[in-house]
Image: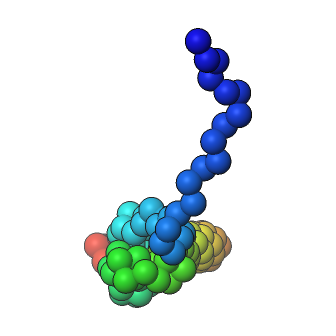
């Protein structure tokens, strides 16, 4: 009986051109586009535009462009949240100033003199 040789046979060389594996498509980040719509709608136009371009760019082979569009949607959604938070904070500060001025004025908090005898 013959023993199998311990030497491994060399791997077969590919005959055609070697292409890089196709990366998976990036997320469209549609949730961030909806957040942009809810919290600061002017940014939602650009966010949805980029979100709708992710898959067509990936399908055409522009993987870097698809990743950029995906990242841009996420960034616009986050920016809309920051803008909303800043506007909310500004409103709270102005409301507090309004209350302080109103309290400092004193005066009648009731009917403002409409029903006096």
In the picture, residue 55 is in which quadrant? bottom left
Name of the residue lying farthest toward the top: 1
> Residue 54: x, y in percent?
39, 77
Q: How far from the left and from the top, in percent, is residue 112? A: 39, 75
Query: Looking at the figure, which quarter contains the N terminus?
Result: top right
In this view, the residue farthest toward the front is 1
Residue 74 at x, y percent in the picture: 51, 70
- Asked if one can make out residue 99 in the rendered structure from this viewpoint, the answer is no
Depth check, front residue: 97 or 83:
83
Quadrant of residue 6 in the image?
A: top right
Q: How many marks?
A: 0
Judge whether 43 appears above or below 88 on screen: below
Front-lying residue, 78 or 96: 78
Residue at x 51%, y 75% (from the top left corner): 17
Please tell me which residue is depicted at 41% across the width and 76% down the height of the picture: 58
The vertical placement of 117 against 13, above or below, is: below
Rendered residue at 43%/81% (across/down): 61
37 over 6 or under it: above or below: below
Query: Looking at the picture, how far across and down is residue 86, in whole percent?
Result: 59, 74
Q: Nearer the viewer, residue 52 or 111?
A: 52
Please indicate whether residue 47 sits to the left or right of residue 101 in the image: left
């Amino acid at each position: 009986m013959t023993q199998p040789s311990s030497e491994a046979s060399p791997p077969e060389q590919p005959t055609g051109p070697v292409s890089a594996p196709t990366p998976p498509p990036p997320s469209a980040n549609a949730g961030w586009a909806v957040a942009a719509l809810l919290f600061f709608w002017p940014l939602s136009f650009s966010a949805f535009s980029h979100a709708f371009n992710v898959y067509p760019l990936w399908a055409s082979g522009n993987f870097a462009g698809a990743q950029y569009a995906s990242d841009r949607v996420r960034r616009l959604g986050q920016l809309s949240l920051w803008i909303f938070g800043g506007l909310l904070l500004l409103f709270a500060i102005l409301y507090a100033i309004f209350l302080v001025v109103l309290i400092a004025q004193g005066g009648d908090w009731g009917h403002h003199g409409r029903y006096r005898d």
